Amino acid sequence: MTTEKQAEKWISDLVGALTDPIITWPSPWMADIPDRLKDRVPLERLIMCARAQKGETPTATDVEALIYMFPLTLERPIGRDWTDIYVYLGTKVFGKETPEDIRRDTLDDQQMRDLNQLKDWIYERRIAARLDRDRAERRERKEEAAERKKQEQPALFDFSTV
């Protein structure tokens, strides 16, 4: 990848960290996601961008995974492994605020694979949404430019009056 393309991708990732949508489980409970979680997303994403610059594979953040699962946990019961993953994410996101009797500091290997797969999936959906938005914006700009050019170009031959 050329340096110019790398710079464009890096800038797109930085802008995306601030403007990309938050991916959630589709549910009426999406509206109840606490603002204190949503407010953390841009900073966590920027940290992930910095880590990606150092060679780490980018993925969704722990807070994004927690937000994704939040509406699902209000909608229906989830299995034991996903409950452990959800509590683990809560422990990582809230740290010392997490009560000792429900803290979960580790996951087994399969649970960690499941969590990483979820985070990769969320990241892919986020990037796809950004690319769709960028394509729509480019198409809109192109249509506006064509319309502007059409309006600015004088009609050299108008045969309707003959």
Image (spheres, helix red, strand yellow):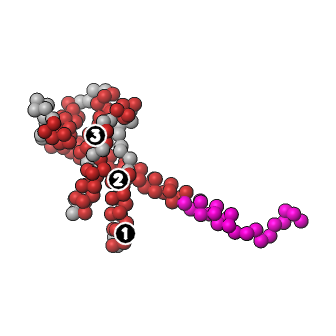
- State whether residue 150 appears in this view: yes
Crowd around label 2: few <14 · some 14–19 · many ≥20 (10 Å)? some
User: What x and y, as percent, mark residue 109?
Assistant: 15, 43
In the orientation shown, which residue stands out farthest toward the left? 100
Q: Which mark is residue 36?
A: 3
- SS state under label 2: helix
- State whether residue 65 appears in this view: no
Tell me, yes or no, whether the two marked residues, 3 and 2, touch with CB atoms within 8 Å: no
- Closer to the chain start, of discs 1 and 3, is 1
Q: Which mark is residue 5?
A: 1
Q: Residue at x 37, y 69 (%)?
A: 5
Point out the image quarter for the N terminus. bottom left
User: What x and y, as percent, mark residue 146?
Assistant: 62, 63
Q: Residue at x 30, y 36 (%)?
A: 34
Numbered range of the magenta stretch: 141-162
Q: Which mark is residue 58?
A: none
Magenta highlight on residue 147: yes
Give the residue type that dot 1 points to. Lys
- What secondary structure is the stretch in magenta mostly built from? helix
- Closer to the chain start, of discs 1 and 2, is 1
Question: Residue 89, relative to residue 11: is it above or below?
Answer: above
Which residue position holds label 2?
A: 18
Magenta highlight on residue 152: yes
How many numbered marks, from 0 up?
Answer: 3
- SS state under label 3: helix
